[in-house]
Amino acid sequence: MLEQGTISIHTENIFPIIKKSLYSDHQIFLRELVSNAVDAIQKLNMVSRAGEYTGDIDEPEIQIAIDKDKKTLAITDNGIGMTAEEVKKYINQVAFSSAEEFIQKYQGKSDQPIIGHFGLGFYSSFMVAQKVEIDTLSYQEGAQAVHWSCDGSPEFTLEDSPRTTRGTTITLTLQGEEEEFLESARIRNLVKTYCDFMPVPIKLEGEVINKQKAPWRESPSNLSKEEYLEFYRYLYPFQEEPLLWVHLNTDYPFIINGILYFPKMKPDVDVTKGQIKLFCNQVFVSDNCEEIIPQFLTPMRGVIDSTDIPLNVSRSALQGDRTVRKIGDYIAKKVGDRLKELYRDNREQYISAWKDLGTFVKFGVLNDEKFKKQIEDIIIFRTTVKVGEQAAAETPTVEVQSQEGDIWQDVTSTSQDSTPGIPYTTLKEYLERNKERHENRVFYCTDEATQATYVELHKNQGLEVLFMDSFIDTHFINFLEREYQDVKFTRVDSDLDNTLLDKDKAGEIVDPKTNKTRSEIIKELFENSLNKPKVNIRTEALKSDNPQGTPPAMVLLPEILRRLREMNAMMQQQSAEFPEDHILLVNTAHPLIQNLANLNQGSIIQGDGQSPTTQLVNMICQHVYDLALMSQKGFDAEGMKSFVERSNEVLTKLTEQASK
């Protein structure tokens, strides 16, 4: 026996800490041991390139062997090996990492980085093993092989070994409750999870079980579209193809590689939880990248690999610092570059992707000033005017990144060149296209279903409407108003532009009995029928070639009052109730309203003050109002109950009159 002694503990009571607290997941012991094996192989390559080793380095490989009878799991590499002195220095002195010292000595001698940086990875094996043995032979000429053994206490033994092959074997005699790691299927799964992209073949039962090639370490020019998609399918099987992807590849001012994908959104996708895999030198570390990725890019998936991301000692969590924030800024910029490239080169694909990612891009614009400046000119909105219906305006200049690097150049883009018939537009294009009809005014819709009538009125009179109907658009409209302070944004149901109204009332006939115009009579009729002092009744004639196709009445919610109500509801964290104060615009050009006026004039007052016709007129007025409310979702449960009852009553009276 060469030596018997006590392990030098740099941290008091280190073994209980390692076994109980240091690593949250026992299974990562395999990751640590395989990482050390890869390091040993890379170190041999370094000393060989430095001319300190002239022997045959063989084909690199790592062997994993299972012996169920002995309850052992062994990991063998054909790397650099260790002498007895190195075992004493790097194994017996816990937390003294050999990686840092080795990197300083052989910096620049290898294109593959050393994985380990903590020196505690080897001791993670004691979480699952009752006994750990090292059998190793150094590459150094004349070196003596040594065998090290420890049962998890500070006591160890170090003695000569009959080993004749260069490299190291770590043998774990597993604890009784950890025998799951004697199953080959379990080991294969762990290798796939943690070690699949390590650049050395890992063999189990004679078969290579890892992929080795890490696509994100390749140059983007070397990867085809199909290879990007194949990698996505490997990471996220049974998922729809991604909308787009971004390849990260920089070594200044930090080192980061990766491929990020924006997935097709589905109702069951939790956009608050990221699914980006964090690697360090091709070793899987964590699924937790929330601190790195800007919040608005949380839905992205893929891989980030960096040695500059600070991890805690177990590599299981990130430690936030300035570098992490800079990396987040870099990722946001690369996403912006990719969006601009897609907008420029393939507008149709950009629009298709926008349907899923538009909300997140807007969120980024609201929260990231740099990102906002980068992509503000390529924010698009669905519009009621299809491309080609109106002459396209002079298009804005779009800045894009040239292929040569970070030199920025102006590239002209049009709204027609690559997306014929697809009704999307930028705000600048909208304003330019409509400056003759309604300069610096934007009509928008937030709910296509409930505001369909209002949208149709605008369309019929040649007014273009933008759809701002995602949940974030309430805030985004406020942002747009700050950015475009000379532009007025008007929701289609807040008020009606004069273009939609027939203002020629000179020809309106005055009733000689009442000395009132038809419009004044209709207004008074609705005021009396509804008896709602807070409802402002307006009578207007809507322009239309087909009055029957226009609504008989519309509820309007003034823009400022509506926004104040929504803001107040948001601050109180409750849904906005429909306001009692609103406008009922009665369309005097509609046949129903004209018939109502005629019915009312022909009604006969009876002893109780109301004739059956007058009762019917009042009920129809209420019914018209209810229909207008319904289009605004202005009913509560009681209101809907009353509407149904009144509808039945109106139909009953109409059928009674028709049957006479």
Image: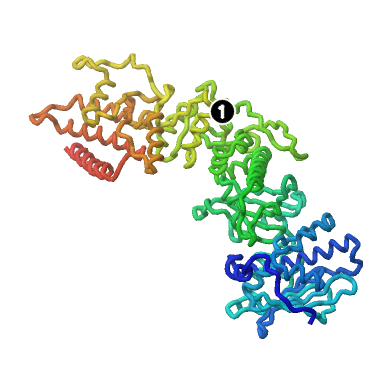
Q: Which residue is mark 1?
A: 390
Q: Amino acid at mark 1?
A: Gln
Does residue 220 appear left or right of residue 565 in this picture? right
SS of the residue at dot 1? loop
Residue 167 at what x, y percent from top left?
81, 72
Residue 164 placement: quadrant: bottom right
- Quarter of the image for the C terminus: give it: top left
Instruction: Give the residue at x 75% y 35%.
Output: 407
The residue located at (34%, 16%) in the rendering is 505
Residue 493: x %, y % from top left: 40, 31
| Residue at 24% across, 31% down | 532
**Above or below for 279 versus 63:** above
- The answer to whether residue 392 is left or right of residue 504 is right
Q: Residue at x 49, y 38 (%)?
A: 473
**Residue 55, percent across and down?**
90, 69
Q: Is residue 73 visible from the viewing direction of this image?
A: no
Q: Quadrant of the N terminus?
A: bottom right
Relative to 41, does residue 591 appear above or below in the rendering? above
Residue closest to the eye, 151 or 436: 151
